[in-house]
Image (cartoon, helix red, strand yellow):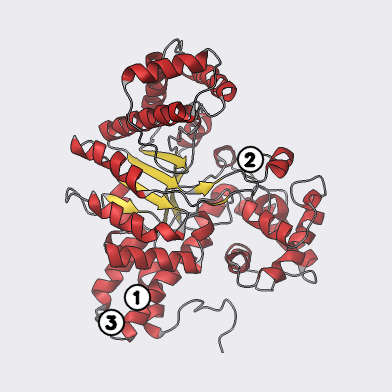
Amino acid sequence: MKNFLDKNFLLQNKTAEKLYYDFAENMPIIDYHCHLPVQQIANDINFENLTQIWLQGDHYKWRAMRSNGIDESYITGNKSDYEKFEKWAQTVPYTLRNPLYHWAHLELQRYFDIRELLKPETAKKIYNDCTKKLQSKKYSVKNLLRKMNVQVVCTTDDPADSLEYHKKIKDDKFEIKVLPAFRPDKAMNADDVNEFNLYVKKLEAASNVSIISFQSYLDALKQRHDFFETMGCSVSDHGLEYIPAEDYTDNEINKIFNKIRNGRELSSEERLKLKSAMLYIFSIWDYEKGWVQQYHLGALRNNNTRMLELCGADSGWDSIGDFQQAKALSKFLNRLDVTNQLTKTILYNLNPADNELMATMAGNFNDGSIGGKIQFGSAWWFLDQKDGMTKQVDALSNMGLISRFIGMITDSRSFLSYPRHEYFRRIVCNLFGNEIENGELPNDMEWTGKIISDICYYNAKTYFNW
């Protein structure tokens, strides 16, 4: 019987161990999609205590605590930091078989060298020991990134963002690249006309462009797109339920935009046409600059309106959706490909039922121009756990080329999340190791080791040209 979280955690045989230790463990991390607060990196802050770095903003943990019967006052409410941590420690033993149990203890080990199990009896000691370490310069956020061998961090940024903190990081000559990603979700969402018009004002201020028409709206967004490029951006990102791909005319879009600016609500068809037009335009801009575009598809957000009003967005009220993805996604990608204006693209799905769909859709538009041009993206959000990662890797292996895969992301708001890359790497090495031991793959460690290193690091480095 193995010990929990020992040296060979998730590695079931000697071949898997060799693949991990020789070819995966020491690869740098390229985190090409996350939600880390860039201001905290720019100011190289130290967190005051373990709660602030570990629990604030982490809706994975919040959902588990709610499921365990913890009152909201101990989650997003006004209880003290230590009281909140106590309730998390009370919850952790109940997370057995949830990935949070693995992640929590991996993070305690990798960052703080703590090998005790977190539970009510150990909570105070672990909290005090970690909090004490967090006060030292060694545990500033930049040093935490260095500790995990992070080479690139790609944040998620609205077009109207000033990117002032990215500039500060660049001016400070921080050796780890911290790059923005262009995320225009708010710019194309007119479901709430009042919110959209407020966004237009914000964009006017950021771009210094007077927005009086749809064309001037595009001019303002294009100015921001160009500005992002000057700040090192080469990635766009979109969080959508599904790809909008409605037919439209330019005249229709002009009328729809004017209707919004006059404060009139849109029909569902009009909203879809506007989103379809804007997403296509953004994709053309991405192609012209040689950017990589990312599509995160399938989340059903903000389900619990009562708790949403209490806690706000991104606080744990989202779930997997069951949207139809294939037809509109194919239409959208094909429209770009017909004119040879389809840039490098990453497709992420949140519903595991869509794994094979996404893997085969990527294959439809891999045109031989570069290896892995269209990527079936890593297991994401609810799927970035052992089962979800394994199924994503298996689907890509069966339907495409896992050897061209660009690997894992954190998709996280926490500076303690980087052991997720280790988790992914151990899982992949174990999958290959088992098949070598079973005679399903040749025992060619040199070549297989190269494939492992490529998946962990080199494919992403080449794909993004970072």
Q: How far apart are marks 2 and 3 (CA)?
A: 46 Å
- Earlier residue among tags 2 and 3: 2
Q: In this view, does 341 lie above or below 377?
A: above
Return the x and y of residue 81 as percentages of the image width and height: 78, 51
Question: Residue 275 is drawn in which quadrant?
Answer: top left
Instruction: Quickly name the residue at label 1.
Output: 432
Q: Which residue is drawn at 67% across and 45% down?
A: 304
Q: How far apart are marks 3 and 1 (CA)?
A: 9 Å
Q: Residue at x 59, y 41 (%)?
A: 40
Instruction: Quickly name the residue at label 3.
Output: 440
Horizontal relation, residue 448 to residue 100: left or right: left
Q: Residue furthest bottom?
A: 1
Callout 2: 10 Å neighbours few (<14), some, many (20+)? some
Horizontal relation, residue 456 to residue 128: left or right: left
Quadrant containing the N terminus is bottom right
* Residue 230 shows in the view: no
Indicate the secondary structure of the residue bearing disc 1.
helix
Give the camera-side residue of 197 and 425.
197
Q: Residue at x 56, y 79 (%)?
A: 6
Return the x and y of residue 194 as percentages of the image width and height: 59, 21
Question: Residue 213 is drawn in which quadrant?
Answer: top left
